[in-house]
Image (cartoon, grey):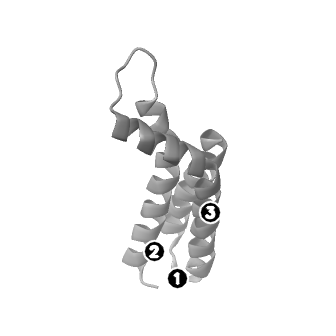
Amino acid sequence: MNRRTVWLALAALCLIAFACFAFPMYVIRPFRAQGPAELALALIVRAWGPWLAPVCAFASLTVLVLSWKQRRVWSRIGSIVILLLTAASPRLAA
């Protein structure tokens, strides 16, 4: 895999894992009107988030391991930071 593909994959997985807890948290707030479609989507994401976020973390770890030898030192550090953010999301989504 080339560097750009690795960065895009890591960023996409991190954003998906983050959205698993951020979107329902934003939509399902007290004293705020929610539309029926918005609330239905938030409840679906809330139901699937605890399963989807760990899958994203595992996929992110897999991408990092497969591309480890091709990476430079600063690129490795950045990738590890993204991996840690992605790995924190399953706990927040639960």
Q: Nearer the viewer, mark 1 or mark 2?
A: 2
Seen as rendered, the residue at the extreme front is 36
- x and y percent of residue 89 in the render? 59, 47
- x and y percent of residue 22 in the render? 47, 39
79 shown above or below 46: below
Q: Is residue 76 visible to the viewer in this orientation of the structure?
A: yes
Query: In this figure, which residue is indicated by the disc labeled 1?
Result: 70
Task: Decide which of tag 1 and tag 3 comes sooner along the chain.
Answer: 3
Task: Decide which of tag 1 and tag 2 comes sooner along the chain.
Answer: 2
Q: Quadrant of residue 67?
A: bottom right
- Asked whether disc 1 touches disc 2, contact meaning CB atoms under 8 Å apart, the reply is yes
- Asked whether disc 1 touches disc 3, contact meaning CB atoms under 8 Å apart, the reply is no
Element type where label 2 sits in the image: helix
Q: Quadrant of residue 34?
A: top left
Q: Nearer the viewer, residue 54 or 40?
A: 40
Q: CA distance from mark 1 to mark 3?
A: 24 Å
Q: Badge 2: how crowded within 10 Å, few (<14), some, or many (20+)? A: some
26 shown above or below 76: above
Label disc, if present, on residue 87 of the rendered structure: none
Q: Badge 3: how crowded within 10 Å, few (<14), some, or many (20+)? A: some
Q: Nearer the viewer, mark 1 or mark 3?
A: 3
Element type where label 3 sits in the image: helix
Query: In this figure, which residue is indicated by the disc labeled 3?
Result: 55
Q: Residue at x 58, y 51 (%)?
A: 48
Query: In this figure, which residue is indicated by the disc labeled 2?
Result: 6
Q: Quadrant of the C terminus?
A: top right
Q: Residue at x 46, y 85 (%)?
A: 1
